[in-house]
Each structure stands twice: as C-alpha cells, then as structure tokens.
Image (cartoon, rainbow, N blue to C red):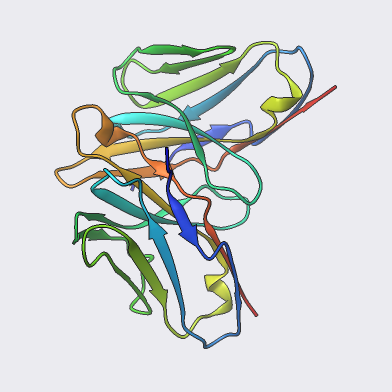
C-alpha cells in the first residue's frame, strides 16, 4: 500500500532562490492538500485541489507561492524569491471524495525547507 | 477563523499512568481527527470522529467528540514509552470541494520508564 510521498525530504537554499517541491498522493485519491508547519505549531492550511482544479488558497499563500496539479495526479509547490520566514516543513496530504473517506487526510513525510 | 486550543501543551509521565488531552473550540466542525507526529515526519492519522457524542476506542486510546461537535478528548490508558510523540487534533469543515483542516497547537507527550 503506497502512501503519500514527497520529494525532496530536505532542502537548503539561499535567500532569493526559487524552490519546487513535489507531492505524489495515494493513487486513488482525487483531493490533494498542502500545509505548512513551523516549529512548535500545528500545520496550517495553504491550498487544496480536487483533481486538477485548485479550489481554495489561504491568505498565507503570498504571490511568491504557486501550486499546480496539472493532470490531477502529482502536485508541485513552488516558492519564488525565498525568504528566511519561508523556513518550515511543507506537508502534503491526500483524501478521497468517497462516502466516508472525505474526512480523512493522509499525510506525506514532508519537505523540510531551510532558507539561509 | 476557527481556532483549536489543545491542553496541556506538554505532558511528561511515567509508564503505566493514564492521561487525557483536550481539544477545544468555539466553532462547530464536520469532523475531528487526531494525529500523532514524530520529529521530522508527517502526521499519522489515528482516528476520525464525525458524530456529536461519538466515542471510539483504539486499543489503549479512547477518543470522544463533544455533543456539540466543538471539542474532543483523547484518553490514553497505561501509557507506554512508544506513545511518546506530538498529538495533534484537527477540525474539519467539509465543503463541496474538500475538507480543510484546522489544527491545534499540539500536545507533546513523553512517557518515561
């Protein structure tokens, strides 16, 4: 049973550089979510997709952030002109729109971003 | 804006003790999930409750959803060192397109021998 995978697991970048993260959801899941978690806090919602449509974006997602899910399968999250405040764990989760399943989200291992 | 407050923030207990973690909000949620997270890893889903007053048991863990669907509790009986971790509650609002989760700040549990 393949879970949610994320790549890379760790990324160190210099301030001002662009970074891109990838998330592969559980294969039969049509919903995909991105969250950000800073040290000592719970995850915060960033955005989500149903199939290839991006349905909601948090105000936390500034115009330097963009997310895509072009074929309704994997998703990418890009951060342009990174700032030190972007340092965090970026988590991806997926769920199904089935009868009971829509409540349950399964998370990947996360991508730890450090901006120096 | 929905907020979830968890208490306590930190809990250090001896093996064999019982404990309860609380998750409270002024908002009503469609569902309430509990997750456990290890350092450097993503949260792992423990349970989902959707009905007010619902109680679910998972071995030594008992989860309860408040009657008004605004609060929840997690009770662990006879805690073991393997229970150590960060416990997160998350309230969900189910809309047409998804179930956006609002997380609590977490309870860091340490169980010592």
Name which residue lies at 45% across and 42% down. Answer: B103
Q: Please indicate, yes or no, whether residue B2 appears anywhere in the rendered image.
A: no
Please, is residue A109 above or below residue B44 in the view?
below
Q: Residue furthest front?
A: A1
Please, is residue A109 above or below residue B15 in the view?
below
Q: Residue furthest left?
A: B96
- Left or right: A111, with B71 as reference point: right
All told, the count of numbered labels is 0
Please, is residue B23 above or below residue A32 in the view?
above
Q: Please indicate, yes or no, whether residue B71 appears anywhere in the rendered image.
A: yes
Q: Position of residue A65 (x, y in %)?
A: 37, 74
The residue closer to the viewer here, B42 or A64, is: B42
Please, is residue A97 above or below residue A109 in the view?
above
Q: Position of residue A27 (x, y in %)?
A: 31, 47
Q: Residue furthest right?
A: B113
- Left or right: A65, with B18 as reference point: left
Q: Position of residue A108 (x, y in %)?
A: 47, 49
- Left or right: B87, with A28 as reference point: right
Q: Position of residue A20 (x, y in %)?
A: 44, 74
Quarter containing the C terminus of chain B: top right
Asked where in the image residue A78 lies, by quadrant, the reply is bottom left
The residue closer to the viewer here, A36 or B26, is: A36
Name which residue lies at 57% across and 39% down. Answer: B106
Name which residue lies at 33% across and 15% down. Answer: B67
Name which residue lies at 64% across and 36% down. Answer: B9
């Amino acid at each position: 049973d393949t879970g949610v995978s994320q790549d890379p697991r760790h990324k160190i970048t210099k301030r001002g550089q662009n970074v891109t993260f990838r998330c592969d959801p559980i294969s039969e899941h049509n919903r995909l979510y991105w969250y950000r978690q800073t040290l000592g806090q719970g995850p915060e919602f960033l955005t989500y997709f149903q199939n290839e449509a991006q349905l909601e974006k948090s105000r936390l997602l500034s115009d330097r952030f963009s997310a895509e899910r072009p074929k309704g399968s994997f998703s990418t999250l890009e951060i342009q002109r990174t700032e030190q405040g972007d340092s965090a764990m970026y988590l991806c989760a997926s769920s199904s729109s089935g009868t009971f399943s829509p409540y349950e989200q399964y998370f990947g291992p996360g991508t730890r971003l450090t901006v120096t | 804006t929905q907020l979830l407050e968890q208490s306590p923030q930190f809990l250090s207990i001896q093996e064999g003790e019982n404990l309860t973690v609380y998750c409270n909000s002024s908002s009503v949620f469609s569902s309430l999930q509990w997750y456990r997270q290890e350092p450097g890893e993503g949260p792992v889903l423990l349970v989902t409750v959707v009905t007010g007053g619902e109680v679910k048991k998972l071995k030594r863990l008992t989860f309860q959803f408040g009657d008004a669907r605004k609060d929840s509790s997690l009770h662990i009986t006879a805690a073991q060192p393997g229970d150590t971790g960060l416990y997160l509650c998350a309230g969900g609002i189910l809309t047409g397109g998804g179930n956006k989760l609002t997380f609590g700040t977490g309870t860091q549990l340490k169980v010592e021998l």
